Image (cartoon, helix red, strand yellow):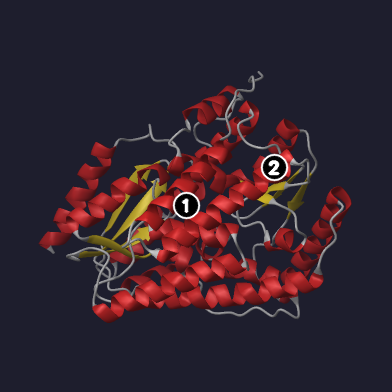
Amino acid sequence: MTVNEIKGNKLAAVMKSARLLVRMNRAHADGRKSDTLYYQMLANYCERILKAKEEGRFFAAHSVFFPNEILYAMDIPSMHTEMTAWMTALFTGETADMLAAGAELGLASEICSAHRGLTGAYALGVLPRPDAILWSNLVCDNTAKCGELLMKINHCPGFFLERPFRNSDGEIQYLVAELKDMIGFLEEKSGHKMDWDKLSATVANMERQLEIYRDISELRKATPSPYHIQGFFQLLNTYYLFPGQPEAIEYLEAVRQELAEAVQAGKGAVPNERFRLMTLFIPPMYRMGFLEKLSQEFGAVSVTEPFFMHWGNGHLNPDRPLESIARHSYMIPEACSMYGPLTEESIKTITDSARDYKVHGAIYYANNGCRHTCATVKVFRDALSEIDVPMLTVDMDVVDPTFNSEDEMREKLQQFFELLEQR
């Protein structure tokens, strides 16, 4: 069954929303500098893709955790597929048409809504059509399977990047060979050549980004914790979309400075911090404002998101850029906890974070279409229970707002806060 194209452009809507938020932040004397930098960075990202499409220049679409630092070094505009679906849900709330179109193409509701929505968006023609699809087996089977369908819908070539499960010198060299093949593919299809000096500089900047992320995580250990709940999505989006980019470093440095000043002043993200929470997996994007209100109302602050913010140890070498990019893929927090064998070390990361950040409870946002993360719910609940940290599981969908209502979520979260109050 085919779906007729309709008017409208979801990415343009995200860009307009980001520009509006830039103006709003600049208009408020107490607006955070980091927010202005972030939304400007996001608006520029969307504009670059839209302009490339308008001018007929080559641009690519890539899946989550694909090493888009290589695309930056080759001056190839690129669009993050899953994050585009998430941003559409967050900034526009308009995902019903995308999800319906995905269903019309035969994608079952058990499939991740980010991929269902993305496929539907391309079928509807409400996202710019790429000249190449790039995808990998990181971090789930939905991602590994999506590329061929997107190639078919967009009538374009693609490249699948295979990243081995385990981390050893042999696997690293295998991935380096895969990266070289991908660069050759992109050079042939795009006409752009790899700028190896630019790639080395990008890797050096990625190392700086990792250092700042670690500094930010340390600052969030303070009591009261200084970081607001919506900031998590900004940090997540920054390392998804802007690896090794100067504007990302400027934004992260602003966040670090703001948090350092708040810690020095003893100022928390909420006026009265009562509950320090650990967030596991991604909250529903379309309800970030709602969750912020609850945070303020109940004095509940997410102080750590170990699935996404625990970068651990390890360093990158600009003199060996492809090897560094390969090693970086094993440092990604999600890759450690949601991809490949679930090791004792991965579980220990969760329990250590609970202790280090002095959390009172954990909230696991169980995304309906994410089978591999939902499979870990009991494992992490049991591990946290052993150190006397209760965990609430909130069934939800990261893109589809019809899965549950704000009232349902509020009731579950309020009951959980009442339980924490009694402890």
Task: Point out the image quarter for the N terminus.
Answer: top right
Does dot 2 land on a helix, a strand or a loop?
helix
- What crowding class fits label 2: few (fewer than 14 Cα within 10 Å), some (14-19), or many (20 or more)? many
Under mark 2, the amino acid is Gly
Task: Tell us which disc is closer to us: 1 or 2.
Answer: 2
356 vs 277: above or below: below
Q: Please name the residue shown 71% across and 74% down the image.
A: 201
| One can see residue 398 in this view | no
Q: Residue at x 20, y 43 (%)?
A: 411
**In the rendered view of the protein, which quadrant contains the C terminus?**
bottom left
* Neighbour tally class for label 1: few under 14, some 14-19, many 20 plus, Cα within 10 Å: many
Residue at the disc numbered 1: 373
Residue 277 figure quarter: bottom left
The answer to whether mark 1 and mark 2 are in CB contact below 8 A is no
Please state the horizontal and vertical placement of residue 217, each as a whole percent of the image: 41, 73
Q: Secondary structure at mark 1?
A: helix
In-image side of 364 versus 146 (left or right): left
The image position of residue 381, as x and y in percent, is 33, 59
> Could you tell me which residue is drawn at 82 percent across and 59 percent down?
183
Residue 147: mark? 2
The one of 357 and 24 positioned closer to us in this rendering: 24
Query: Whole-percent x and y of residue 261?
Result: 33, 77
Position of residue 181 measured from the top left corner of the image (x, y, whole percent): 84, 59
